[in-house]
Image (cartoon, rainbow, N blue to C red):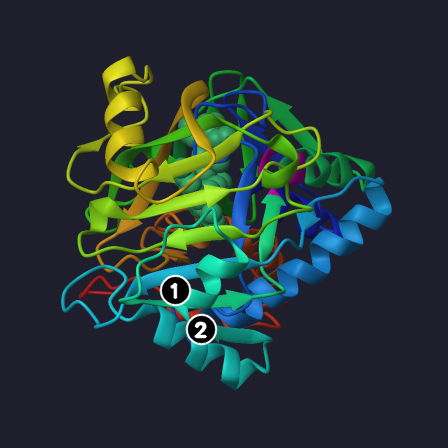
Amino acid sequence: MGSAVAYHASRLGLSVLGIDQFEPPHDLGSTKAETRITRLAVGEGPQYLPFVARSHEIWRELEDEAGVQLLHECGGIIITEQEPIPGQRWEDFVTETARIAERGGIDYQVLDPADLRRERPWINVPDDRNAGFERTAGLVMAERAVEVQLAMARRRGGRIHTGETVEVIEPEEGYVTVRTDAGAYEATNVVLATGPWFSELAAPEHREQVSVTRQVVYWFEVDDLDAFTTEAIPFVMWIAQRDEDYIGLFPMPPDGTPAVKILGEQFLDTTDARSVEREVSQSEIDTFFEVHVAPKFTGVTRNCIRSAVCLYTNTTDDHFLIDTDPRSEHITVMSPCSGHGFKHSTALGEAVAQRIATGTSTHDLTPFRSRHQNR
Ligand SMILES: Cc1cc2nc3c(=O)[nH]c(=O)nc-3n(C[C@H](O)[C@H](O)[C@H](O)COP(=O)(O)OP(=O)(O)OC[C@H]3O[C@@H](n4cnc5c(N)ncnc54)[C@H](O)[C@@H]3O)c2cc1C
């Protein structure tokens, strides 16, 4: 989120200073593990469609300028239970996705499970499931996108300070003072995009709306690597009865870890970016493979060659929190994106930068305002 704002703000001619405590892209936050799913038919809600669609355009512009590939349009399959599950995080995701695809004129096909098994025998989908396929869905290279946006911000005169930690943000009359472990800066506008560290600098009203959870990503070796690349197969999102039985399979991008990336989700144990357990144990790997991978996918071995711990920063309703800070109209908060923010990130960065530069943005950010009652 921070690199996107820095890129777009410098593109708009603003004077930009980006500050990060580490050397982004790094592997301690939420933007890591090579790839992120992107879908134009965003079943999370119609408010997201303009952002993901614009992000796809910007990834392509950045690819042209930087000469690297950021977006792999490999397509995406979504599998869910047939009946909506009341109270479940994903509820009626396939139907909602189909509705948004229809509204947005997006190429989306509802699939019969038997046909899906015939065409893609590596997916053990039972007959009593719903399934759909979006051709324009794909994977975005996450760390590479950060790297490119920071390089392009610098090319346009942006200053990026890394290895510098922001300690305090002090709202003043008409500006903001940012104090770090290396100095102090005055800015007319500050964007707080601190990911899973959000609560450390956020206002109390915002802090109480977010929680951070540990998520684990696994790379399993496959019998035939060529059959599991972004050239060969789409990603799969498999939504189950219980939130914690969700599973996502990501094909291998060019130059990626030579394996298939598979992840689950959990929301039961909250944590924070400083104390999270960053090791993945062998028993976690074995259990994940046996419970989630082996029954669903053929051709994936139990040999896990890499794993990583990543962090979600969720709001209470699993949507986004992008808003003016309660302490000052000169501060914007934008990081809590409930585990589905990357696909929208560059367009969100553009909209936030536009709002700072002109007071308004091409795409509507108001659906992501704080749900705090006393706002
Ligand atoms: C396992 C996993 C899978 C995901 N899958 C998808 C997906 O398929 N599709 C999708 O769209 N989204 C996905 N997401 C969500 C998406 O990756 C995140 O929404 C996005 O990467 C968050 O970026 P961010 O900039 O908010 O946070 P981060 O990338 O964590 O960046 C925050 C930055 O702030 C810096 N910082 C924090 N505090 C300070 C401070 N005090 N001083 C200086 N710097 C500071 C940190 O060093 C860090 O670099 C996934 C997330 C995870 C964890």
Q: Quick check: can you spot residue 172?
A: no
Q: Is residue 144 magenta?
A: yes
Which quadrant would residue 50 be assigned to in this image? Answer: bottom right
The percent position of residue 52, horizontal first and vertical second, equals: 56, 63
Q: Quick check: can you spot residue 293?
A: yes
Q: Quadrant of ligand 1?
A: top left
The percent position of residue 278, horizontal first and vertical second, equals: 33, 18
Image vertical order of residue 154 relative to residue 27, above or below: below
The residue that disc 1 covers is: 368
The percent position of residue 82, horizontal first and vertical second, equals: 26, 71
Mark 2 vs 1: CB contact within 8 A: yes
Mark 1 packing: few (<14 Cα in 10 Å), some, or many (20+)? some
Q: Quadrant of the C terminus?
A: bottom left
Q: Amino acid at mark 1?
A: Phe
Q: Is residue 363 left or right of residue 160?
A: left
The residue that disc 2 covers is: 47
Callout 2: SS: helix
Residue located 40% across and 45% down the image? 248
Q: Earlier in the sequence, mark 2 or mark 1?
A: 2
Q: Is residue 202 left or right of residue 361?
A: left
Residue located 54% across and 23% down the image? 26
Residue located 60% across and 33% down the image? 143
Q: Is residue 73 left or right of residue 86?
A: right
Q: CA distance from mark 2 to mark 1?
A: 9 Å
Q: Which residues are magenta?
A: 141-145
Image vertical order of residue 370 relative to residue 265, above or below: below
Mark 2 packing: few (<14 Cα in 10 Å), some, or many (20+)? some
Q: Is residue 289 magenta?
A: no
Q: Amino acid at mark 2?
A: Gln
Q: What label sits on residue 285 in the rendered view? A: none
